[in-house]
Image: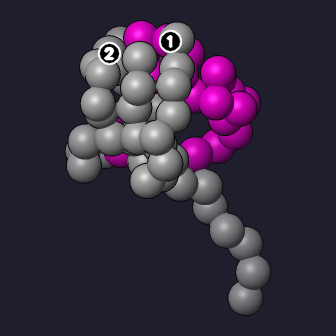
Amino acid sequence: MKIEVNGEAREVAASQLDAALAELGWGAAKVATALNGSFVPAGARGETMLSDGDRLEVLSAMQGG
């Protein structure tokens, strides 16, 4: 299915958010996710279903000072 990831069109085979993150290379990463503008906690990613055209934002913490 086609979804938008951080503003970029991507094709994913996964239908659940956790599997899509793994497919996109963020499987083990500590990231924050929002689907269609709503925050999705890490514990809810396995039960969060994706649909064609969804907008996914993936954010990682930055260190520095």
- Residue 51, image x and y in percent? 28, 19
Q: Is residue 36 left or right of residue 48?
A: left
Query: Does the stretch in magenta take in 28?
Result: yes
Q: Which residue is mark 1?
A: 14
> Is the residue marked by circle 2 packed among few (<14), some (14-19), or many (20+) residues within 10 Å?
some
Tell me the kind of residue under disc 2: Met
Farthest residue in the bottom direction?
65
Position above or below: 21 against 13: below
- In what element is the residue under mark 2? loop
Q: Which residue is mark 2?
A: 49
Q: Quadrant of the N terminus?
A: top left
Of residues 34 and 64, the one nearer the viewer is: 34
Position above or below: 33 against 18: below
The residue under the point 64% across, 21% down is 23
The residue under the point 53% across, 54% down is 59
- For the magenta stretch, what is the residue range? 14-35
Of residues 39 and 57, the one nearer the viewer is: 57
Quarter of the view holding residue 29: top right
